[in-house]
Image (cartoon, rainbow, N blue to C red):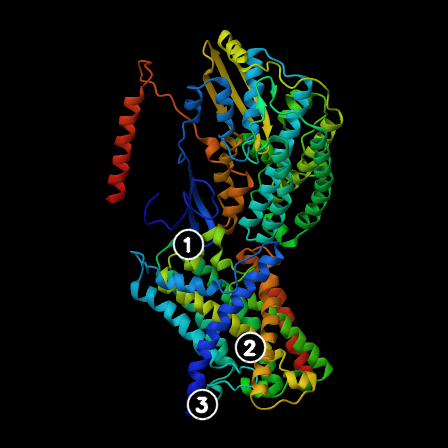
Amino acid sequence: MPKTAYYIPIGPIHPALKEPIRVEAEVEGEKIVRVDVKRGFAHRGIEYMGMKRNAIQTLYLSERICGICSISHPYAFVVTAEKALGIEAPPRAQYIRPIIAELERIHSHILWLGVIAHEMGFDSLLFWTWKGREKVLDLLELLTGNRINYSVYMIGGVRRDLKESHIKAIKDAITYYWKFTEQMKEIILSDPVYKARTRGVAQLSKEMALKLNVVGPVARAAGIRMDIRQDMPYDAYADIDVRAVVPQDIVGEAKGDAYDITMVRIYEIEQSLDIIEYCVDNLPEGKILAIPNYPALLAKIRRTKGEAIGAHEAPRGEVVHYLKFDGRDGPSVWKVIAPSYNNINSWAPLLLGAEVADIPIVVAYIDPCMCCNDRVALLKTPEGKVLGYEYIHKKAVEKTKKIEKEVRG
Amino acid sequence: MTPETLFYAVAFPVLGIFLGLTYKGIDRRISARMTSRIGPPIRQPFWDVGKLLLKETVVPENAVKWLFNAMPILAFASSMTLLLYIPFGILKAPLEGYGDLIVILYLLTLQSLAMAVGGFSSGSPFSSVGAQREMVLMMSYEMPLAIVIIGFALLYKSFSLTTIASTPVWTMVSPVAALGVVLLFIALLVVTPAELAKLPFDIAEAETEIAEGMLAEYSGRNLALFYLSDAVRGFAMAAIEAVLFIPFTFSYVFGISLNGAMLYIVESLWFLFKVLIIYIAAVTIVRTSFGRFRIEQASRIFWVHVNLIALLGLALVWLGVR
């Protein structure tokens, strides 16, 4: 973009963005006439680290991909690993897993509602929703021992069982959240300022959504009936009739704007409550781990050669993991696709023609996660030789020097 | 100029800064309590100013330096001057004979204008967008503000604030005109948050959109001056509303006759209480219960809704006076 252009640089550091990404918007008055989204500011190489560890260590590393989807990545990982290794989790574990995953969806959606409210300057709503979110975090702490990285899933089951006291606490929380979602519908969906700021903003048509490959609530708000739990059911979801929440089922038509996505997210909280209720009421008895002995599990992994692809419907959309086991006690290849990777594609077309005031809402409506997008790239020469550490390090140093030179002029 | 006036001329701005910052502290505290937070101590704005004064003042490389540095001083000076025109309870304004409501209107505008010019001169795209928004917003809310002043001029046949403050407005209006004055009061209450750049009309400083807009490039002493002038303007705006619409003294309301030092103390505290009530009603509660509007939505609110209320009020006042 030429330096003479009148453009607003949003990011990599900006109050509307909590993680590094850059949106360069060229404006005429308040209207955005050209936009450029640049990503690639977060470099962690987490997949590369995973391929250096054993499978159990990698599972807990996968929790660290995202701070909010800290159960979604392990869920996709264990589903994939079990498929590759031919292990089936015991029925009780298959019912405990969705309970934790749906509780996470509740906290993630409520968190998002606070974030979008903050982006439009509605901080009271932020504090109110986040206050409501505390209860589910407390519950997760009670069930798993942790508030953020739960470390409760294991290949072939879960590490912690649910006690009677836990079930009572879950039921209490469900009662609380039924009331809370009713209040949210009343307060958020009928608020004139919220409506004024979100109706028609970030509007994605069904055709556009399909073209851009958006996933999760973004796709559902555009009217696409798509949910991994419905399309490719796993664990207890196979026993439950999970139907994707789409606006046309709620109000008759899908506009696909930020208001619709709010509606979808609030109704998804109710769906999660239903799923948790079902799982708690129908919790089977029995053991929680298929192979409780970890050395035995690692030995089985070492003996197995195979690959699999698995997915889980995270609060933001589908998380897809690919794993290949090749005689080591860890994955020889681990590939992750996070929902934000697809959803960020929608920013540029939505921002074009929008107003400056809509930037934070468009940015926030997909619930972006930059650290989810971080990937390691394996570089190959034209001869097919994989480039080693020294070469990549040398290239990185060269690039840094080049950037330094450009910056200093 | 008598020594007494000179004393007031020095004492009023000092008192104004103290009260402005205290009210800001109270506002933050109440807003925090309304959103289930503890909030900062009431003295926090004083620490904020102290911290800003200690920090380095950075001027951007591509800013128009003299303009960039002059605007905070202009804003601060205009808000200080504003204080000298407001009768503090039963105390007379030091500059009462030298200006009227029109001057107050211009002094209020001058500060917003100084911020906008400062934003434009900083050379930052965020500040420029903020300054543009501020100009649009000013054009939107000046009309209802002017209508309120015209309404009072119709009633009193004078623009002088001292004349208005000497006779309570409610005692000299017919029922029809009283209804008109109520409508004017409502219009002014809606204008207040916009005038003070508070939610839902803090569009020019929208933190999540344009990173504090006009103030994005300001730091250190310059930011401290803007901060102070903002605090003082908040107090002054609420004080003007108290003088115009709630002019009743403590002795009048409670039928107690006071004299000597007691009269001044009680009446001053009563005045501060009235200002605080208006401040909380027009700023704290509103900014806590609304999200930010878009600029065109805000403009529509002022040009259509608030203007209609104000014009209707003016028409009723006109009918009542005749």
Q: Position of residue A329 (x, y in %)?
A: 47, 13
Residue at left 72%, top 80%? B176
Residue A309's image quarter?
top right
The amino acid at mark 2 is Ile
Quick check: A205 above or below B147?
above
Quadrant (top left/top right/bottom left/bottom right) for the C terminus of chain A: top left
- Residue A337 is left or right of residue B181, and the answer is left
- Per the rendering, the mark at residue B240 is 2
Q: Relative to the observer, which residue lies in front, A101 or B79?
A: A101
Residue A106's image quarter?
top right
Quick check: A409 above or below B102?
above
Q: What separation in Å lies between label 1 and label 2 (alpha carbons)? A: 32 Å
Q: Can residue A177 be seen at all in this image of the molecule?
A: yes
Quick check: B96 above or below A83?
below
The amino acid at mark 1 is Phe
- 2 and 3 marks on the same chain: yes
Identify the residue position indicated by label 3 in the image: B4
Element class at badge 1: helix
Mark positioned earlier in the residue sequence (2 or 3)? 3
Q: What separation in Å lies between label 2 and label 3 (alpha carbons)? A: 23 Å
- Residue B116 is left or right of residue B322, and the answer is left
- 1 and 3 marks on the same chain: yes
Question: Numbered disc 2: what chain?
Answer: B
Identify the residue position indicated by label 1 in the image: B126
Question: Numbered disc 1: what chain?
Answer: B
The amino acid at mark 3 is Glu
